[in-house]
Amino acid sequence: MFFLASCGWEKKLTLRQDNGEGRVEIEEPFPINGSGLRIVHESHGEKATLLEVRADTFLSFADAVWTQDGSTVAVFICRGGPDIRVAYDVKNHHPLAFTEAFKKMLANDIRNRYRPSNASGSDELVFRWACSEGQQPFLSRYPDAVAR
């Protein structure tokens, strides 16, 4: 007899806050990674699920940034379909609207980390780069993010 069951979620990637206080973990269902994605924020022993998607998902790029005071985190993910953009109030434990300020923070972080060919372009162009040409540099930096 052969049984196939989902054994839970597998951590594929950890993005750490610069000061080490917080982290965002990107998880995918195990053993079939392409069937979903979950974003979890952890800080000071507290965990919060920011988003869970159960659909065909192929993680190809992810980035997270925190505000200077660490009170808010914004996450951008490319997944082989519409990209994911979320923001979360870490101090008060609730989702926030993904504003232009978060978009600018993330685009600038991607510019600084990856030096995309269109770095001088708009923030949207930087996100488009991340979801196409950015996959290889991202996977070089985070090889464990490759799907099974």
Image (cartoon, rainbow, N blue to C red):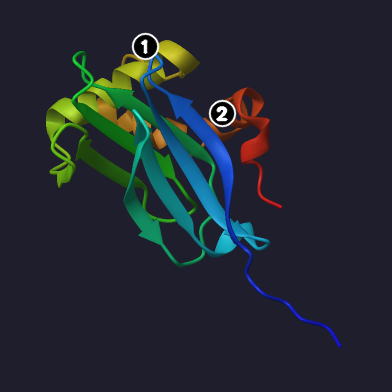
Label 2 SS: helix
- Disc 2: which residue: 138
Apparent side of residue 82 relative to residue 3 in the rendered image (left or right): left
Location of the N terminus (image quadrant): bottom right
State the residue in front, 64 or 58: 64
Q: Residue 64 lies in what quarter of the image?
A: top left
Around disc 2, counting alpha carbons within 10 Å, would you say few (fewer than 14), some (14 to 19), or many (20 or more)?
Answer: many
Residue at 31% in and 17% down? 108
Image location of residue 48, percent across then percent down: 32, 45
Q: Position of residue 27 (x, y in %)?
A: 51, 48
Question: What percent of the width, then of the height, locates residue 127?
Answer: 36, 33
Nearer to me, 29 or 143: 29
Left or right of 1 on screen, residue 14: left
Residue at 32 percent across and 14 percent down: it is 120
Left or right relative to 7: residue 79: left
The crowd level at tag 1 (other Cα within 10 Å; few <14, some 14-19, many 20+) is few
Mark nearer the N terminus (1 vs 2) = 1
Residue 19 numbered tag:
1
Residue 53 location (% of width, % of height): 40, 61
Q: Residue furthest front?
A: 45
Mark nearer the viewer, 1 or 2: 1
Residue 86, can we see it? yes
What kind of residue is marked 2? Phe
